[in-house]
Image (cartoon, rainbow, N blue to C red):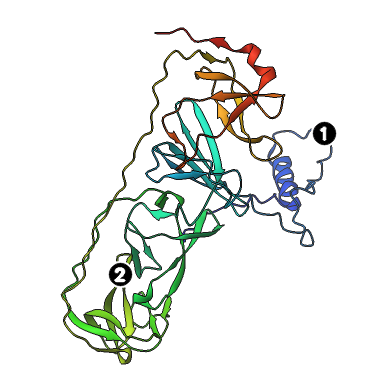
Amino acid sequence: MPMSSHSTLRAPRPWAAFAFAFAFSHTACAPAERPPARPLVISPQQAPDRDAPERPARASRPCTIREASLNDVVRFRTRPKGTVLAELVDAAAHLELTESSPRLELSKGGVVLWTPYDRAEHPLRFQRPVALAEVLTLAPGASVEWVEQRGGLELVRYTATEALHGAALEAEVACDALGLNLADFPMDWDPDGEPCTLEDATPVSASAGTPPVLTLPPGDEPITCVELERSGDFVRIAAADMNEAMLTGWVPSRFVSEGEDYGGFGLRGIGGGGRAYGRVPLNVDFVACPDDLRLFVEAGEAPVEVGVVRRGTPFQVLKDQASDPRFSRVDLWQTWIWPTSGQSLPHFQVDTSRLHECRPVAEE
């Protein structure tokens, strides 16, 4: 990993100032009285303090994932694994990867909604081919788990299927390699070689004779592979993890056995589509506000803040009384907010005291 170089400023030594003053006094044309040279003082900020604790490294900014339009359907909740209040589709997505409970923000049409991020429902995926530890290249549909941030890079973990005996591999990658949507990038899935199998717990290295970066656990069945080349006591192999990833690396030849010809590997990138939910507003009195409005939803005893209505965004103030008199129910009339099956849309609310700033929207 490339390291940033830092230059260190060294304070001039006290004898240097004295030598300079002595040389200058002996080369002047005529002697002249001068005030005594001031001793060079190194301030506590400049002087090294061996006993002082090291300053903590400046915290890096969280990795932020952005999608112009998220292809997955997002289940809108107010708490993790809570009741699904609505389904959100085809909206822009914003996600900051943090160790605390991250939230997934969706925005479209002047409305922003946030919901607890569910790693299982919306896993991270690579947006371009990346070889983890130089041996494991993930396909567009494969998912990784974010672990933590390290020195500006993101530590992710990939867990293989039974095809590779559930092997797990952690590696550091750049933030911009990660996304939520399914990408579509080419991969080399047609290795030319002899069929083989891997027996027992097999160490895999990026180069012949180097320390292993991954060990394939033993399993009930041998791992199917293709022998690509040999170098001394090592064999370069390729093995597919179902439709998820391709493993290419060097293993000791004693772990490799001949296999049956099974016709090679095959895989292609896939993408996702979207849908829309629409109601036609007829005889609806819309209003818009000069400033952003905090958006709430009725959930339990007290309203829960779930988003923002951007300034100038039209919405309808309903006559239905909210459960909390400090709030007013509103209808957002957003086509990307769907009701769940057999349910109506949730009761969105805004602070009633802010509505006096809003004005009717003229019909076009």
Q: Amino acid at mark 1?
A: Glu
Tally of marks: 2
Asked which quadrant contains residue 325, the reply is top right
Q: Residues within 10 Å of mark 1 (few under 14, many from 20)?
A: few
Image point 38% across, 33% down: which residue? 277
Q: Amino acid at mark 2?
A: Met
Outermost residue toward the bottom? 254
Image point 74% across, 56% down: which residue? 48
Q: Nearer the viewer, residue 34 or 280?
A: 280
Looking at the picture, how far across and down is residue 92, in whole percent? 43, 36
| Above or below, 224 relative to 315 | below
Kindly state the secondary structure of the residue where label 1 is placed: loop
Image point 82% across, 41% down: which residue? 38
Circle 1 residue = 33
Kindly state the secondary structure of the residue where label 2 is placed: loop
Circle 2 residue = 242
Asked which quadrant contains residue 330, the reply is top right
